[in-house]
């Protein structure tokens, strides 16, 4: 039938740097190739805070943020074949169409099928399903999980097993997959490799557990928050460096000394471009690879002496841990359900949608690892 109108409770970002407002939005039902998902739980990632704070060059307002959710398909539009009402799914900000040049290349997870409209806060047909008092409210990262109901393209949902709890598996929608995937898919860390992780938050701790899973040798964590030492050790970190007040040269020298010449792999999970340079320069001469996970503020640039690369260090980046969503996310859920990776202890706070602004405060204060909103 024709797409219908419904209401949904959502946390709306009306303007940058303003608290989210909980309102009832109008939501248009799914069109061809789209699905209506009831979001059961959503994590709050630092990228949501970065966009809300006005640092995202693609940030659009008013919008429904949130990209780390889990829920249930309630309705499917015409032509949808891969999921049906009742299926449990995780929304994908990196979809997997299996048809575009990127998907067919086998070289990347960065599906391009709907990236252009996604960056404009719109569905693939160029319109938004959300509105408030007759005004358009934009989608975010193709997900908008800070809404009780959301509409997603079929290629942007991963079907997952039904015994996985929503409250914890939502974290696989970004943080867990990004951190673990950066180690397994992007770096391809091998047994015995020395790994350094800068920033031990919701992403960095998952890099640490990914490194443990890969059988890394030393797993060194670097953070300016001393509370993060205990957190890192819980998930496999072997050494901690509190870099607060240290110069880049000192951090590099310290890491080089701890790793007999430099790390095999370093990861930036801070989004700070100075830290990214430190991470590159802490790599071993001749082969060390630094992987950028952190998302930097609009206008920021990275730099280093080209000699760093001439002498064999490699600079790379990763989005969503290099994971192909529809294929890999169900496997990560299995890894969680069979105990190969941990999620529960990282979820430090659980709250209702009305308290969502608290999640941002806790993150900025360094008091949470992950906050999860349950509907
Ligand atoms: P978070 O706030 O939970 O953690 C950030 C950590 O970095 C904190 O422990 C903080 O103390 C530490 N930190 C801050 N400045 C530092 C410095 N100068 N030196 C060392 N440590 C420092 O954030 P998060 O949710 O883990 O996200 C981390 C970054 O990853 C953000 O930039 C986020 O946007 C990005 N991200 C990228 C992807 C991707 O696909 N590439 C996915 C998710 C998140
Ligand atoms: N919109 C920003 C870039 C933000 C960014 O790099 N996002 C990551 C995911 S962060 C998840 O917490 C990503 O997937 N990037 C690949 C892509 O296609 O967006 C900007 O700079 O404009
Ligand atoms: Zn995220």
Image (cartoon, rainbow, N blue to C red):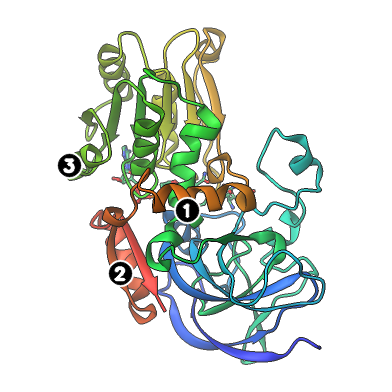
Mark 2 or 3 closer to N-term?
3
Q: If the image is split into quadrants, where does the C terminus sit?
A: bottom left
Location of mark 3 (residue): 230
- Mark pair 2, 3: CA separation: 21 Å
Answer with left or right where residue 3 lies relative to residue 243. right
The answer as to whether callout 2 falls within 8 Å of ligand 1 is no
Is 262 left, or right, of 246 in this rendering?
right
- Above or below, comparing residue 99 to residue 107 in the picture: below
Q: Earlier in the sequence, mark 3 or mark 1?
A: 3
Pointer 1: what residue?
333
Above or below, 308 against 348 in this view is above
Q: Give the mark count.
A: 3
Closer to the chain start, of discs 2 and 1, is 1
Residue displayed at 45% across by 23% down: 280
* Residue 275 image offset from top left, x and y in percent: 39, 33
The answer to whether the beta carbon of the residue marked 3 is less than 8 Å from any atom of ligand 1 is no
Marks 3 and 1, how far apart at CA: 26 Å
Under tag 1, what secondary structure? helix
Category of crowding for the residue at label 1, using alpha-carbon neighbours closer than 10 angstroms: few (below 14), some (14–19), many (at least 20): many
Residue 224, quarter of picture: top left
Check the picture and name the quadrant holding the N terminus: bottom right
In this rendering, is residue 25 above or below 302?
A: below
Q: Which residue is located at x 55 percent, y 44 percent?
A: 299
Check disc 2 and report the residue beneath it.
Answer: 350
Q: Of 208 and 158, which appears nearest the observer?
A: 158
Q: Position of residue 227 (x, y in %)?
A: 17, 45
Residue 357 in which image quadrant: bottom left
């Amino acid at each position: 039938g024709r797409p219908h109108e419904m209401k949904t409770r959502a946390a709306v970002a009306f303007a940058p740097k303003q608290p989210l407002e909980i309102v009832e939005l109008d939501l248009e039902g799914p069109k061809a190739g789209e699905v209506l998902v009831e979001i059961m739980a959503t994590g709050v990632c630092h990228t949501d805070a970065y966009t809300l704070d006005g640092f995202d060059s693609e940030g659009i307002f008013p919008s429904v943020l949130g990209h780390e959710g889990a829920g249930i398909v309630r309705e499917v539009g015409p032509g949808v074949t891969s999921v049906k009402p009742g299926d449990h799914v995780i929304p994908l900000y990196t979809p997997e169409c299996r048809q575009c040049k990127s998907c067919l290349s086998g070289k990347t997870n960065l599906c391009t099928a709907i990236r252009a409209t996604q960056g404009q806060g719109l569905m693939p047909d160029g319109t938004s399903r959300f509105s408030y008092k007759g005004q358009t409210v934009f989608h975010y990262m193709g997900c908008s999980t800070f809404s009780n109901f959301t509409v997603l393209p079929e290629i942007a949902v991963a079907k997952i097993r039904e015994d996985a709890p929503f409250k914890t598996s939502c974290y696989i929608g970004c943080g867990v997959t990004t951190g673990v995937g950066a180690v397994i898919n992007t770096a391809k860390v091998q047994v015995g490799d020395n790994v350094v992780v800068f920033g031990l938050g919701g992403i960095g701790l998952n890099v640490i557990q990914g490194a443990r899973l890969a059988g890394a040798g030393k797993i060194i964590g670097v953070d300016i928050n001393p509370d993060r030492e205990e957190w890192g050790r819980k998930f496999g970190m072997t050494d901690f460096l509190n870099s607060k007040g240290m110069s880049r040269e000192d951090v590099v020298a310290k890491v080089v000394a701890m790793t007999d010449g430099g790390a095999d792999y370093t990861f930036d999970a801070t989004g700070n471009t100075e830290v990214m340079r430190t991470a590159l320069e802490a790599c071993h001469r001749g082969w060390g690879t630094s992987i950028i996970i952190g998302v930097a503020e609009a206008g920021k640039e990275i730099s280093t002496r080209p000699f760093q690369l001439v002498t064999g260090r490699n600079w790379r980046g990763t989005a969503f841990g290099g994971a192909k969503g529809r294929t890999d996310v169900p496997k990560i859920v299995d890894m969680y359900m069979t105990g190969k990776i941990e999620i529960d202890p990282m979820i430090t706070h659980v709250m209702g949608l009305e308290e969502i602004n608290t999640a941002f405060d806790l993150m900025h204060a360094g008091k949470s690892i992950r906050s999860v909103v349950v509907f």
